[in-house]
Image (spheres, helix red, strand yellow):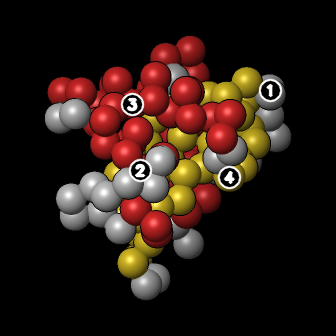
Amino acid sequence: MTANPLITLRPMSDADHSFILNQADQFTVFGPYVEVFRRMLNGHAVPGVLVQNIQFSICEVNGSVAGFLAVEWKSDEGIIHGVVASPDFKRKGVARGLINHHVP
């Protein structure tokens, strides 16, 4: 697959916290993910997660924040805790770009 030049991946900044928490609402069918991500973003303990090893990546499309991925690193292994494309950007390569960025 050819890279889309309009998609940019970058590390999360503090300004992205509200976007992440709004999008985490998509996971509520699986449990209290808004609170889980809030705890991760604030560096607080989450059962079974090494919060200090969480990396959030942000995907932008044409300069608009379009999705995020949260991955926990244990040695060389990454455990994906969430990958989201916001509703306006679904089926546009956002989730695939985020995952491909982290999978060698």
For mark 2, what is the residue?
40
* Residue 79 vs residue 7, the one in the foreground: 79
For mark 1, what is the residue?
62
| Residue 27, horizontal then vertical, whole percent | 29, 31
- Callout 3: SS: helix
Task: Identify the image quadrant of residue 21.
Answer: top left
Q: Report how far apart the C-alphas of labels 1 and 4 lie in the structure.
A: 17 Å
For mark 3, what is the residue?
24
Left or right of 101, for residue 35: left
First of labels 2, 4 by sequence position: 4
For mark 4, what is the residue?
11
First of labels 1, 2 by sequence position: 2
* Residue 58 vs residue 40, the one in the foreground: 40
Q: Report how far apart the C-alphas of labels 4 and 3 lie in the structure.
A: 17 Å
| Residue 80, horizontal then vertical, whole percent | 38, 56
Q: Report how far apart the C-alphas of labels 2 and 4 lie in the structure.
A: 15 Å
- Callout 2: SS: helix
- Callout 1: SS: loop
- Tally the marks: 4
Circle nearer the viewer, 1 or 2: 2
